[in-house]
Amino acid sequence: MAVVDGTVLSATAEGLRALDARTGERQWRAAFDGGSPTVRGDRVYISTDGAVRCLGFDSGRELWTRRLSTLTSQPLLLDVDSQGARVFVTTERTDENGATEGAVLYALDASTGETAYRLSSDTAAIYGHLAGRGTHVYGGTTTGSVVAFDVSAREVAWQAHLGEYVNSVAVSEAVVFAGSHSGVVAALDRITGDERWRTTLEGEEVAVRVRPAVATGTVYVAATDGNLYAFDEVTGEEQWRFDGGERLSQPPTVVGTDEECVVFGSDAGNVFGIDATAGEMQWTHQLRDRVNTPPVVVDGVVYVGDSSGRLYALANEDSTGVAASGSCRTSSTEETARGQRDTDGDGVVDSQDYAPRDRSVQSKSDLRDRYGEASTENEREGFLLGTGVGAAVSLGGVGLGYVLWGRSAADSSDS
């Protein structure tokens, strides 16, 4: 997803959709499957099956298409010194038998899609999201390495091995951060690749499958053990960990300035807002199914999708104040009369209870009631039922959240 200028761009199996960020009404649809959209000015860049495409932001009209075989990464738009804006993507280089020989980094002209240059490497295939800073582009490989391309010198600058499979990387002014499927989290010098620190997450078969988030001296890492970890950016020392209950398959998002909040989702369908300093929960909201997009936070509203094909816009009743302060905190208020069953007797109704490892508390019937699943007529129209009460539990008590709108992937106006 991307949210820009009041428009939500959502990539689905039915195509790329542009929705009004306030109402969820469709503005246009481009009928091809694709990955994460990147927006720059009046253009949208997206990788589809074997091609990089550039679309008009307002219309969805295709402006150019660059077809590439074995495309393996999402487009990275980077302003390179003396080169202007470039769209970087990677492909897999194979031999005549189909075996991987290396990776190729393409630099495409952002205006025309023409190849400005390409760099070949002997690394394994590079998958996931690329990161860029200055004259360097970074990616993770299927054999567990981080590779850095110096696009000014037109060469591979360095490689660093972290273990089994590196999906994506994040970069700050001086450091590249990455995690591997073997549970290794490392900080590498951005220019030389020298290791600054390395840590291995505890537990059996714990993996990091998504890119970290970096903000204000802290690195936030989502792992398959259900924990969100916070590490000191300089030393690698663990500051705190938060138990999200089930596997975390999407990267976290950091929002705010004075009071930073980390927003992330789990495979159990929980979306959390965590105090970035203390690692304490500010609120949570239960979606219908597994969270399958990184949360995007704009003007105090959290946009997120789940694997049922729905998009959600989540906010509290003070979202205007949230936009002004840049905080994600959910205000405390009284419970509504809806869904008052309290299975575990802790004073919080089941449908709003933060207990992700206790399946008896958050039941499927609670979710069906909340999102109007019983009303098949309304579901056929492509919307969830109106404004529903969501789980927004703050540390001081029970808060009230709400779904501004929820749009299913099967948009009735598409037919």
Image (tube, grey):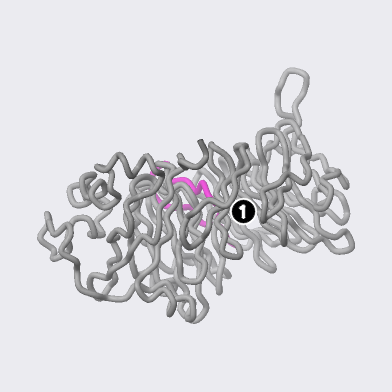
Q: Nearer the viewer, residue 111 or 90?
A: 111
Residue 178: x and y, percent?
59, 54
Outermost residue, top side: 97
224 relative to 199 in the view: left or right: left
Place residue 3 in its image quadrant: bottom right
Residue 338: x and y, percent?
17, 60
Q: Is residue 99 above or below residue 190?
A: above
Main SS of the magenta part reads loop
Q: Nearer the viewer, residue 175 or 40?
A: 40
Can you identify the residue that label 1 sits on? Answer: 169
380 relative to 98 in the view: left or right: left
Q: Nearer the viewer, residue 148 or 128?
A: 128
Please, what is the three-letter code of the amino acid marked with disc 1?
A: Val
Residue 251: x and y, percent?
50, 54
Residue 104: x and y, percent?
78, 39
Place residue 314 in its image quadrant: bottom left
Total number of numbered discs in the rendering: 1
Mark 1, secondary structure of its residue: strand
User: Is residue 278 highlighted in magenta?
Assistant: no
130 relative to 79 in the view: left or right: left
- Residue at the location (89% across, 63% down)? 82
User: Is residue 210 highlighted in magenta?
Assistant: yes
The residue range painted magenta reads: 197-211
Q: Label 1 neighbourhood size at 10 Å, few (<14), some (14-19), many (20+)? A: many
- Residue at the location (58% across, 70% down)? 234
- Residue at the location (52% across, 69% down)? 218
Q: Is residue 89 above or below residue 153?
A: above
- Residue at the location (17% across, 57% down)? 339
